[in-house]
């Protein structure tokens, strides 16, 4: 028995365990109670008439990275219906605001055969685009058995994941062989995919390079600028557990030379805000919390932006940005988002999720790597006191982001053989 057959059996025998995990997630607010049935493949909307393209992205970052691509597909193929699935509550909230009105959003079904089949029987997608590497065997094998054309966009497999898969030679091949084409982020990712069984791989670049600048509310930006005035500020964006303490230490160090400094923290997971605020309070730092409607005052040391979907606002507010998930071993976050918005960038050494982006930004002078609180303090001191230096870095980062945005044209060229026949197909009937 091959491992995929074993997996399919285990996901059926393990149904009580899967249901229990989902109940706990629901109780913790990690599932949407109003749309929970979608996780079991039960639709909340009818299927539209006509050919339907399915895009799947696991969470916020992957979903946001293809918004520009989705809009381009809508313009080029207006007769092609689209459905996007994601797996997290936060991504669903963001997509509700940012997806084009004609594009349907649903939660992705959990990878049990009955739930997957429910989903496919209702939506009957004509083709699928998988974003990055959220590879669920039951879904992908069912799509292949149905003869559904599939491509993987922004395909990536980390070196660590590749090493684990190589312990089971050929194990990933039944999953990967369902893709008629894998469009890899870079040569290293492409080589890993080939070694694990992908039949056809092409390197076109990172779709995150083509994303639009994050949105913002101009009135909110004006209000924050008025409240902060001419105080020096910097942003610690998308921080993870363990990094806020480092940021607080850096703030205390910088106060010696910049006594009016204010630090802004946008945690990657706002649900951690209470514990972050308590830790900052223990260091005698005055904290204002955005989720409570608090506005920074002259007494505010740390402004905790514990909301969802407002990074575009804070990237425009701050010209100097530390991108989190990188001083601790989490793989980093997307540095191109602040690069598009004229920010000088700092990051830690742990950026394997965005290794090519980090290297390119470092090489062009748009970003600098820091290894610890001491180096972060030293770099920030220079940038906060020398506006010409921070402006030079921001210009370099922005120029790289503009140049790499050309990846969108390459992606659309590769997708044309898949999308054009679909858009010209005879319309099917909507779900009754």
Image (spheres, helix red, strand yellow):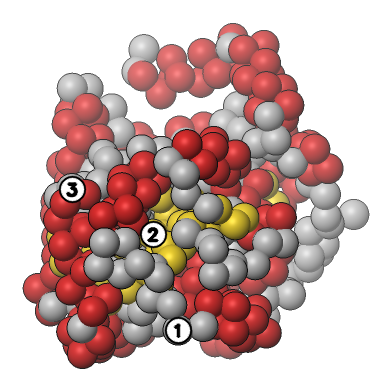
- Look at mark 1 in the image and give the residue it sits on: 230
Is 323 situated above or below 393? above
Which of the marked residues, 2 or 3, is nearer the chain's N terminus?
A: 2
- Residue extending furthest toward the left: 363
Regarding mark 1 in the picture, which secondary structure is present there?
loop
Q: Which is more toward the observer, 399 or 86? A: 399
Count up the numbered dots: 3
The answer to which image quadrant residue 167 occupies is top left
Specify the label residue 397 is tagged with.
none
Q: Residue 135 is drawn in which quadrant?
A: top left
The mark nearer the N terminus, 1 or 3, is: 1
Horizontal arrangement in the rendering, residue 312 relative to residue 383 (left or right)? right
Residue 336, visible in the rendered structure: no
Find residue 111 and report its horizontal and vertical position in percent: 57, 31
Observer-side mark, 1 or 3, equals 1
Q: Answer yes or no: do the residues labelled 2 and 3 have beta carbons within 8 Å?
A: no
Q: Which residue is mark 2?
A: 236
Relative placement, left or right, of 63 versus 217 is: left
Question: Which percent across, then down, holds residue 150?
Answer: 45, 56
The answer for how far apart the CA atoms under marks 2 and 1 are is: 19 Å
Task: Please tell me how crowded label 2 is: few (under 14), some (14-19), or many (20+) other residues with Cα within 10 Å.
Answer: many
Disc 1/disc 3 C-alpha distance (Å): 28 Å
Q: Label 3 belongs to which residue? A: 372
Q: Secondary structure at mark 2?
A: strand
Distance, label 2 to label 3, CA atoms, is: 14 Å
Labels 2 and 1: the sequence-earlier one: 1
**Residue at left offset 83%, top offset 55%:** 45
């Amino acid at each position: 028995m091959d491992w995929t057959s074993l997996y399919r059996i285990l996901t059926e025998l393990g149904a009580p365990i899967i249901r229990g995990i989902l109940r706990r997630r629901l109780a913790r607010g990690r599932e949407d109670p109003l749309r929970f049935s979608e996780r079991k493949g039960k639709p909340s909307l009818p299927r539209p008439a006509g050919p339907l393209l399915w895009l799947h992205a696991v969470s916020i970052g992957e979903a946001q990275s293809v918004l520009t691509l989705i809009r381009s597909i809508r313009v080029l193929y207006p007769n092609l219906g689209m459905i996007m699935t994601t797996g997290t509550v936060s991504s669903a909230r963001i997509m509700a605001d940012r997806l084009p009105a004609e594009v349907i959003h649903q939660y992705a079904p959990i990878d049990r055969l009955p739930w997957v089949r429910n989903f496919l029987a209702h939506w009957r997608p004509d083709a699928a685009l998988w974003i990055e590497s959220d590879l669920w065997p039951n879904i992908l094998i069912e799509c292949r058995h149905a003869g559904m054309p599939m491509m993987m966009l922004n395909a990536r497999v980390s070196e660590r994941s590749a090493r684990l898969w190589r312990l089971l030679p050929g194990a990933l091949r039944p999953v990967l062989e369902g893709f008629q084409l894998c469009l890899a982020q870079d040569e290293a990712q492409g080589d890993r995919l080939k070694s694990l069984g992908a039949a056809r791989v092409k390197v076109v670049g990172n779709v995150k390079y083509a994303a639009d600048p994050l949105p913002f509310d101009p009135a909110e930006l004006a209000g924050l600028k008025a409240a902060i005035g001419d105080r020096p500020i910097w942003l610690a964006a998308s921080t993870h557990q363990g990094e806020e303490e480092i940021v607080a230490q850096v703030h205390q160090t910088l106060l010696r030379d910049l006594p009016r400094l204010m630090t802004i923290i946008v945690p990657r997971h706002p649900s951690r805000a209470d514990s972050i605020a308590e830790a900052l309070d223990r260091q005698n730092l005055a904290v204002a919390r955005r989720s409570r409607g608090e506005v920074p005052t002259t007494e505010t040391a740390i402004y905790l932006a514990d909301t969802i979907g407002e990074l575009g606002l804070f990237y425009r507010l701050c010209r100097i940005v530390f991108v989190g998930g990188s001083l601790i071993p989490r793989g980093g976050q997307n540095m191109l988002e602040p690069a598009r918005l004229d920010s000088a960038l700092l990051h830690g050494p742990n950026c394997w999720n965005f290794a090519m982006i980090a290297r390119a930004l470092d090489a062009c002078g748009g970003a600098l790597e820091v290894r610890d609180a001491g180096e972060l303090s030293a770099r920030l001191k220079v940038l906060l006191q020398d506006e010409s230096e921070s402006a030079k870095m921001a210009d370099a980062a922005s120029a790289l982001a503009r140049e790499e945005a050309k990846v969108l044209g390459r992606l659309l060229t590769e997708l044309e053989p898949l999308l054009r026949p679909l858009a010209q197909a005879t319309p099917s009937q909507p779900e009754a």
